[in-house]
Amino acid sequence: MILVISAIIILGIIQFTYKQTYSVSLNGEIIGYTKDKVNLQKRINDYISSGNGDDVAFVEVKDLPIYTACLLKKNVETNDDEIFEKVTSAGTSYYKYYAITNNNTEKVYVENFQQAEDVVNQLKEKNSANSANLGIVEKYETAKAEFKEVSQCVDELYEKKITVTSGSPYKNIGKQIISEASVPTNLGISLIRPISGTISSRFGIRSRDNHKGLDIAAPKGTAIKAAAAGTVIFSGNGAGHGYSGYGNVVVVKSTSSVVILYGHCSEVNCRTGEQVAQGQIIAKVGSTGISSGNHLHFEIRYNGSAINPQNYVYN
Ligand SMILES: [Zn+2]
């Protein structure tokens, strides 16, 4: 009888002090606690299947959380929102759009298939010289392209049919096809590739943020070489130094206008204030800061604005 009473008292104390909770782990690391794992997982699943932007086709999340039942002291907070952020911020959004190709080279991009068909049909109607070489490619990419209106695409792709007679002074006159909308900034220096690897995310607009650099995936510890010589203006953990999210980061000022950032490093191999040579090993690839896997975030700033690194390297 005493045993029964004491058992009831103990259970009462447990109930009073603890609540039924799930610890949530990602990649073997506990990232928080939730009381409602079904609802939390549903939120995550909804996000994966459609993202949070209209034109996001789907989101790829590398690792899903694992829930383990546990008792948690009542004064410890659950943090569903933080968990959701942690899981989804490691995700990659894929956009669906269409490229119009000429001789299998992507020339212009439109948002939907109807627009792509209109462009091709209008060029055929106008009897464009390249009508027979045009194609439509469905794209799933981690960054959106620069979309154009149907009429702009038609103007850009249209090629006049020229009958060339031998010796004609007009034989080179035709419509020039310009694929790049704007001429890239001349940096005044030439860059080398800091690492070799696979491009995992390009420069440009993403669903939640503007991606200011180019991501190159490579194994942890891969040596990162300085793309250009310069002065190290910051080296170390960027948090609290104007480079939060970058993890361990090396920032090199190469000219008065050009600053190059190397983010998410596992370690840095140079000091603030140091002069580095082009090709010198300055850091190692890692996944520190806001990062979903081992990669180099390679960012070029020209007069303070991030510009597309692929105008200079990895192109
Ligand atoms: Zn990046």
Image (tube, grey):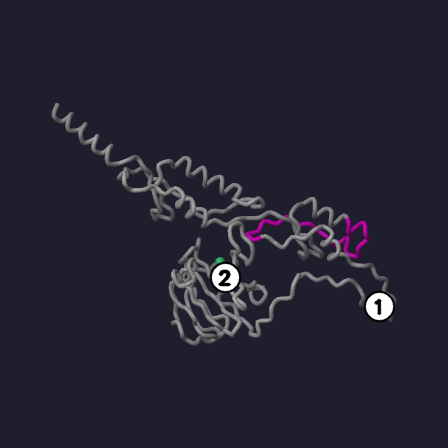
Hey, which residue is sitting farthest left in the picture?
2
Which marked residue is nearer to the observer: mark 1 or mark 2?
A: 1
Q: Is residue 141 magenta?
A: yes
Q: Earlier in the sequence, mark 1 or mark 2?
A: 1
Residue 234 vs residue 130: left or right? left
Q: Secondary structure at mark 2?
A: loop
Is residue 47 among the parts visible in the rendering? yes
Q: Is residue 134 magenta?
A: yes
Q: What is the C-alpha distance between the residues marked 1 and 2?
A: 46 Å
- Disc 1 target residue: 170
Q: Secondary structure at mark 1?
A: loop
Q: Is residue 218 above or below residue 256?
A: above
Assign the C terminus to one quadrant of the image: bottom right
Give the residue at x 29% y 38%. 70
Q: Which residue is mark 2?
A: 197
Residue located at (58% from left, 45% from top): 55
Hey, which quadrant is residue 186 in on the image?
bottom right
Residues shaded magenta: 122-143
> Residue 23 shows which numbered tag?
none
Could you say which quadrant of the image residue 53 lies in?
Answer: top right
Q: Amino acid at mark 2?
A: Gly
Q: Quadrant of the N terminus?
A: top left
Dot 2 crowding, Cα within 10 Å, few <14, some 14–19, many 20+: some
Q: Is mark 2 within 8 Å of ligand 1?
A: no
Residue 26 place in picture, x, y as percent: 38, 47
Q: Residue 102, position in %: x, y?
A: 71, 56
- Tell me the kind of residue under disc 1: Tyr
Depth check, front residue: 293 or 108:
108
Mark 1 in CB contact with mark 2 (< 8 angstroms): no
Percent x, y of residue 148 = 67, 53
